Amino acid sequence: MEKKSIEGELRELVKKAGLRKVARDLGLDHGSLFRSLQDGSNIKLNRVRMILDYFGYELKISKRKRVTN
């Protein structure tokens, strides 16, 4: 099974819709958006949420029932 980064998953969504269109709709510079979607870019959580919201997704973080240390 191939392991993908969050940047890679978001990059696929943006690529299908068009980088320039998504950047324009979000009020971002397309170069900045492009750099955010590169593997290892250390994309900020607010940008992840912005992109996910644009595509109708939401980010949920939940605590596991059993935590092992």
Image: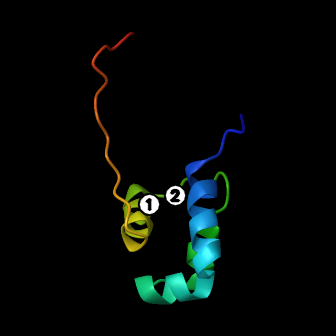
- Looking at the image, is mark 1 or mark 2 earlier in the sequence? 2
Is residue 46 in view? yes
Is residue 67 depicted above or below 33 in this figure? above
Assess disc 1: are there few (<14), some (14-19) or many (≥20) residues with their C-alpha within 10 Å of its C-alpha.
some
The quadrant of the picture occupied by the C terminus is: top left
Three-letter amino acid code at disc 1? Val
Marks counted in the figure total: 2
Is residue 19 depicted above or below 11 in this figure? below
Which residue is at 44% across, 68% downward? 51
Alpha carbon distance from label 1 to label 2:
7 Å
| SS category of the residue bearing label 1 | helix
Q: Which residue is mark 1?
A: 48
Left or right of 15: which side holds 60?
left
Discs 1, 2 touching: Cβ within 8 Å? yes
Which residue is at 49% across, 90% downward? 24
The answer to which image quadrant residue 17 occupies is: bottom right
Assess disc 2: are there few (<14), some (14-19) or many (≥20) residues with their C-alpha within 10 Å of its C-alpha.
some
> Residue 27 location in percent, x, y?
42, 86
Is residue 27 in view? no
Which residue is at 63% across, 64% downward? 12
Is residue 52 depicted above or below 15 in this figure? above
Q: Which mark is residue 43?
A: 2
Is residue 37 depicted above or below 64 in this figure? below
